[in-house]
Amino acid sequence: MKIYEYVVKKPKITSPYGYRINPVTKKKQFHYGLDLISKSGNKNLYAIDNGVVQKVVNNQSKSKTGYGNYVWIRYKNYNLSLLFAHCSKILVKKGDKVTKGQVVAIMGSTGRSTGTHLHLGMTRIGKSAWLNPSKFDMLSDKPVVVYYKVKKGDTLSKIAKKYKTTVKQLCKWNNIKNPNVIKVGQKLRVK
């Protein structure tokens, strides 16, 4: 199943990720997310997994983004942060831990919006580049991110080979500046 199919029950994409004519400004621009409605009429928005609420904006007049009422939730197991925007009501607060399937917000039409829907945005944790939510599968509930605890005798080269990746990628994922220096007991992201 696609990530957005966990967020909205029986979803229908009303505006895909990519270039489009903005329904408010009527100008061509890039749409950094998916606009979704529920074919069943269910307006509940669900957490895709256990996560932590990063940010909540519950007063649409303070939202300079046009998102109206919105919430960001970080899902460490998937190395993703999801934006739920244009909500009529947000049911969580910053710092809350959420569980898979928990209702976190109600779909709405706050901010710059032409009707009730969810704008679903997605980034990697700690990154600002937007990702296309329609391209991500939940991989049968298996986490995308895997960690490894460094053992005596390990090198990044050996670890990279074991997990079918590269030393360069391991350094990038783990902010390692010198690939020759790792410590026993260090926890490294390997997938």
Image: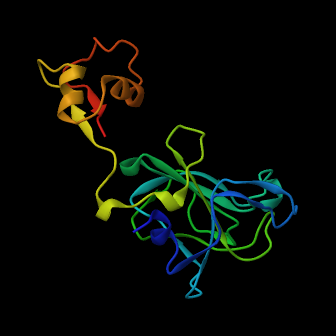
- Judge whether 168 appears above or below 115 on screen: above
Name the quadrant of the C terminus. top left
User: Looking at the image, what colour scheme do you see?
Assistant: rainbow
The residue under the point 55% across, 88% down is 40
The residue under the point 36% across, 50% down is 77
Compared across the picture, whether 80 is left or right of 115 comes to left
Q: Report x, y in % for residue 116.
A: 71, 77
Farthest bottom residue in view: 40
- Judge whether 73 appears above or below 145 on screen: below
Q: Report x, y in % for residue 112.
A: 81, 63
The residue under the point 80% across, 62% down is 22
Name the quadrant of the N terminus. bottom left
Q: Report x, y in % for residue 50.
A: 39, 58
The residue under the point 81% across, 56% down is 28
Quarter of the image holding residue 152? top left
Q: Closer to the camera, 53 or 160?
A: 160
- Judge whether 161 appears above or below 125 on screen: above
Compared across the picture, whether 137 is left or right of 55 comes to left
Quarter of the image holding residue 67? bottom right
Q: Closer to the camera, 174 or 13?
A: 13
Q: Report x, y in % for residue 66.
A: 78, 57
Farthest left residue in view: 153
Count of numbered marks = 0
Compared across the picture, whether 102 is left or right of 186 comes to right
Quarter of the image holding residue 153? top left
Compared across the picture, whether 178 is left or right of 148 comes to right
